[in-house]
C-alpha cells in the first residue's frame, strides 16, 4: 500500500510525535520509577483528555514504555495526577497545580456558558452553597467518596441529584477548585472525589499573566510544532490574552517553516528524530485532538471512520509513520483483552507486524493476555 505525504507534513507529524513523547523512549529525561514518569508525562502533555477514563489512562501509559495500568493508578493514588475539568467543560488527567492554573483563567467563562442549563435543572446559588457544605463536610479530613456516595449525601441533605443535577453540582464544585477526582475508590473500578487542596496542596501562585505565559509555553513544549490558533482552539482562552502571552515569552520560543507554514516550537527543541513506525493510540488522544485541524494526521476521507456519525466519540487509532491508518476496539474482561483491528486500507506486512506489536504493548500495559481479531473475523 502506498501512502503519499509531502516530506514537510511527514516531518511535522514526526516532530509532534516527539514533543508528545510518543517516540518509544523513556519519557523525556525524567528519572524515577514508572509512576513518577507517568506524572512527568501528564505534566508534559499539560492536559490529557479523559472523559473515557480507560482511554485517558492509556494515553499516559503509551508514552511511558514498560509501564502498566497500576503505575498510572499509583500516580493518581499519590496525588501526582488528578482528573477534573480544566477547560472546555471536558474531563482531563492533569497535574493538580496545572489544574489550578487553568481554572484561574477558564472556570468563570465555562460556568457562565452553562448557566442556562443549570437554570433548567433548578440549580441556583443557594443550591450550590448547600452542595459545597455537603462536599466539605463529607470530604474534610481526608474523606473520599464515589459519585454514588456523594449524590446519596446530597439527597440526604435535601438536594435532589436525579436528572443529572448531582453530576452538574459535582462539575460546578470542581470548577471552583474545591473537589476533583483523585485516588481509585475501593474496588478499583472508579475514582473517588476528594478536596483538591487537601489531597494535593498548591505549590505555586497563578497570577493571570503567569498563567497565560506558562500554559502557552507548556502547550508548545508538549505539542509543537504548533500555532497560536491551535493553542486558542485547544484551551479556549481568548486570542487577545494568548497574543499578549506570546509577546512576553517570544524569546523562549522559535518559529520553524514546514511546507511554507510557520509553526512555534520551544527554543532549542530537537524533538522527533525517531519514533516507532506503528502505534496504537487511544481515542481522544492529543496527537489528533491537540490541534485545530485533524490534518495531516488524519486524511479527510477517513474522518468518519474515527468519529462514526460525527457524534463526538473518537475511536482508538492505529498510527503508521505519523498517519492515522485505522481504528481498533477493545473488550476487556478479568482474564483477557480482545482487540479488533479495523485498518482503513490493507496494511503492508511490515505495518501489520508493527500494529500487532503496538496492541501487544497495550495488553502488556493491562497485564492481560491478548486476543487479536480483525474486523472481518
Image: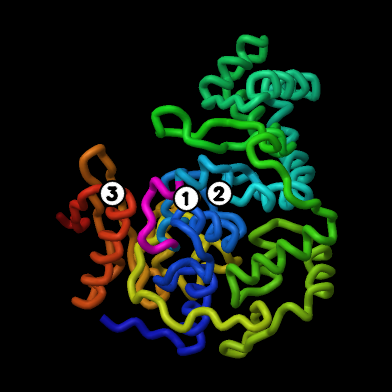
Q: Secondary structure at mark 3?
A: loop
> Which of labels 3 and 1 is toward the front?
3
Residue shown at 64% from the left, 83% from the top = 268
In the displayed structure image, the side of residue 201 where residue 2 appears, left or right: left
Do the CB atoms of the residues marked 3 and 2 lie less than 8 Å apart?
no
Q: Is residue 259 visible?
A: yes
Whichever of callouts 2 and 1 sits on the residue coming sooner in the sequence is: 1
In the displayed structure image, the side of residue 210 where residue 61 appears, left or right: left
What span is in magenta? Answer: 64-72
Q: Secondary structure at mark 1?
A: helix
Find disc 1 in the rendering and name its residue.
Answer: 56
Point out residue 367 in the picture as x, y percentages from the top left corner: 28, 49
Q: Camera-side residue: 42 or 305? A: 42
Q: Camera-side residue: 218 or 49? A: 218
Disc sitting over residue 93 in the figure: 2
Circle 1 packing at 10 Å, graded few (<14), some (14-19), many (20+), is many
> Which of labels 3 and 2 is toward the front?
3
Amino acid at each position: 500500500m502506498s501512502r503519499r505525504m509531502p516530506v514537510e507534513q511527514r516531518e511535522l507529524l514526526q516532530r509532534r510525535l516527539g514533543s508528545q513523547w510518543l517516540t518509544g523512549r523513556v519519557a523525556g529525561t525524567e528519572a524515577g520509577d514508572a509512576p513518577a514518569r507517568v506524572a512527568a508525562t501528564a505534566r508534559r502533555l499539560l492536559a490529557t483528555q479523559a472523559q473515557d477514563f480507560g482511554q485517558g489512562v492509556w494515553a499516559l501509559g503509551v508514552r511511558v514504555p514498560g509501564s502498566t495500568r497500576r503505575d498510572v493508578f499509583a500516580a493518581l493514588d499519590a496525588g501526582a495526577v488528578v482528573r477534573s475539568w480544566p477547560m472546555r467543560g471536558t474531563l482531563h488527567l492533569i497535574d493538580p497545580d496545572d489544574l489550578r492554573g487553568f481554572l484561574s483563567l477558564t472556570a468563570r467563562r465555562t460556568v457562565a456558558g452553562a448557566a442556562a442549563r443549570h437554570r433548567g435543572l433548578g440549580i441556583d446559588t443557594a443550591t450550590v452553597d448547600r452542595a459545597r457544605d455537603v462536599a466539605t463536610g463529607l470530604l474534610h479530613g481526608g474523606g473520599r467518596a464515589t459519585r454514588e456516595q456523594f449524590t446519596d449525601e446530597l439527597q440526604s441533605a435535601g438536594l435532589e441529584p436525579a436528572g443529572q443535577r448531582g453530576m452538574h453540582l459535582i462539575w460546578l464544585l470542581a470548577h471552583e477548585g474545591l473537589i476533583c477526582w483523585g485516588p481509585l475508590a475501593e474496588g478499583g473500578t472508579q475514582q473517588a472525589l476528594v478536596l483538591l487542596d487537601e489531597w494535593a496542596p498548591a505549590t505555586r501562585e497563578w497570577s493571570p499573566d503567569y498563567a497565560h505565559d506558562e500554559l502557552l509555553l507548556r502547550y508548545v513544549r508538549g505539542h509543537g510544532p504548533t500555532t497560536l490558533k491551535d493553542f486558542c482552539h485547544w484551551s479556549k482562552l481568548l486570542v487577545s490574552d494568548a497574543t499578549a502571552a506570546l509577546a512576553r515569552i517570544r524569546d523562549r520560543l522559535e518559529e520553524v517553516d514546514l511546507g511554507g507554514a510557520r509553526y512555534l516550537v520551544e527554543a532549542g527543541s530537537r524533538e522527533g528524530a525517531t519514533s516507532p513506525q506503528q502505534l496504537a493510540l487511544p481515542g481522544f488522544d492529543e496527537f489528533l485532538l491537540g490541534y485545530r485541524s485533524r490534518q495531516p494526521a488524519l486524511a479527510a476521507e477517513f474522518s468518519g471512520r474515527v468519529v462514526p456519525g460525527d457524534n463526538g466519540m473518537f475511536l482508538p487509532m492505529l498510527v503508521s509513520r505519523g498517519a492515522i491508518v485505522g481504528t481498533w476496539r477493545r473488550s476487556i474482561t478479568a482474564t483477557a483483552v480482545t482487540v479488533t483491528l479495523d485498518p482503513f486500507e490493507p496494511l503492508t506486512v511490515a505495518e501489520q507486524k508493527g500494529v500487532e506489536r503496538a496492541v501487544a504493548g497495550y495488553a502488556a500495559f493491562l497485564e492481560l493476555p491478548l486476543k487479536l481479531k480483525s474486523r472481518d473475523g
